Amino acid sequence: MTIPIEPTEACAFALDRADPLAPFRDRFYLPPGTIYLDGNSLGPLSRDAEAALLQTLEDWKGRAIAGWFEGPRPWLGRAREIGALAAGMMGAAPDEVVHSATTTVNIHALAASFYRPEGRRVKILADALNFPTDLYALRGQLRLRGRSPERDLVLVPSDDGRTLDEERIAAMLTEEVALAWLPSVLYRSGQLLDMAYLTARAHEKGVLVGFDCSHSAGALPHALDSWGVDCAAWCSYKYLNGGPGASAFLYVNRRHFDREPLLAGWFGNRPETMFDMALDFEPAPDAGRWQISSPGVLGSSTLRGSLAMIEDAGIEAIRRKSLAMTAYLVALLDEYLAAPPYAFRVGSPREDARRGGHVAVERDEGAERVCEALIARGVVPDFRPPSVIRLCPSPLYGTFHEIWQTAGHLKAIVDGGEQRPGS
Ligand SMILES: *Cc1c(COP(=O)(O)O)cnc(C)c1O
């Protein structure tokens, strides 16, 4: 049974009562007395993640160096083990995903292998709304190849400063582009790009395509293999709840397993021969060859717990609830908060198929002070200058009634003039 979304408190109660994911909330530690809407920046700790980390500490205590090779889950296999746990929700095979390094390092590692300037095909296509670190990495890779970032990094512009037009991106995939590196979900507006469409258009033009899935991994299902994406990277501390700075992920489509990992390191060697300590690098036959260093065993342990929980909840069910939550929030904004003096605007796409896991709420005046007032009232949003308040209701630990309460706080903040300078 689906409950129609209406901008009422009764609707929130009905949705919460019917919510199959409601029991997951008790598995999280949430800051006391807060409504946590910032899981797209840092997911909170779950009991599952805590238990997995404590288990690793026990293993370290009890085994010391033997922990690499012995016990139920030797650390040596950590990168592949956690990669395999994330593969299903990303629509990839277990040997195509590896848990390694951090997002920005993985972007460097992938670009080093996938950006091969040749003949006229020398450019990298990205977009003007991209997360800054991605662009920094791409510019660095261009310089390493002796190319000019000013000339060879092409950014697809945005007409409204919020969203990208997929057809425009497609039109910019020319025979001069070697690699397109794009976001799955834009970190500000929450727009979800059509990755299947973009991959197909890129391949028609002979362009390789990679996605940064940091803002979609754990929020919605992916089909990286069936879309034919060439490579991808994503972080583990947003919707995957791995904890601050936890190691990240990379995906390489198996048709590229023979590419050379140019940011090579000893953990990318074939596992069987890595301890021969030969001076010649013998890359592993799978995505594992893009590993660089010893896995951050402590910082990846949490993910064994949190990824298993997502598996348990089911990524389809997570997406269903997430869409209902953001649709409910949008309905409340439209009904109570759009007109003056409230003047909040929805900066995210309204169509389900184009919306990721958060809603960008915009206000021309005092958006930052609205955020501060929300925090003072126990609601945790985040702010992206100059005018975007990001609200991310979580399907695993959030409730519909919290969204109702948050809308009430927004209204009360403006009613009380809390967003005015000096108030
Ligand atoms: C969060 C995020 C990152 C994070 O990069 P780190 O290297 O983990 O600091 C990178 N790109 C995007 C799009 C992100 O959302």
Image (tube, helix red, strand yellow):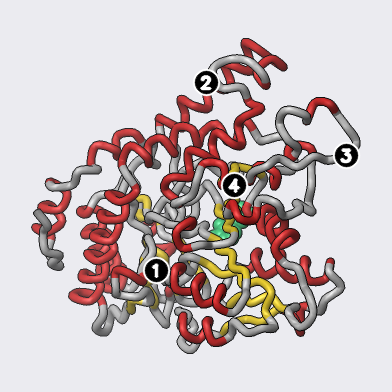
Residue 49: x and y, percent? 46, 32
Disc 3 from disc 4: Cα separation = 27 Å
Residue at horizontal 43 percent and vertical 52 percent from the top: 39
> Ligand 1 near label 3 (Cβ, under 8 Å)?
no
In the rendered structure, which disc, 3 or 1, sits on the residue that comes first in sequence? 3
Relative to 363, say whether 97 is above or below.
above
- Disc 4: which residue: 248
Residue at left offset 63%, top offset 14%: 61
**Disc 3 target residue:** 280
In the displayed orientation, state which residue is furthest to the right.
279
Circle 4: element type = strand
Image quarter in which the C terminus is found = bottom left
| Front position in the image: 422 or 127 | 127
Residue 112 or 234: which is nearer the viewer? 112
Q: Is mark 2 within 8 Å of ligand 1?
A: no
Q: Nearer the viewer, mark 3 or mark 2?
A: 3
Label 1 sits on residue: 370
Which kind of residue does numbered mark 1 sit on?
Answer: Val
Split into quadrants, the picture shows ligand 1 in the one at bottom right
Residue named by callout 2: 55
Q: Is residue 101 above or below residue 152?
A: above
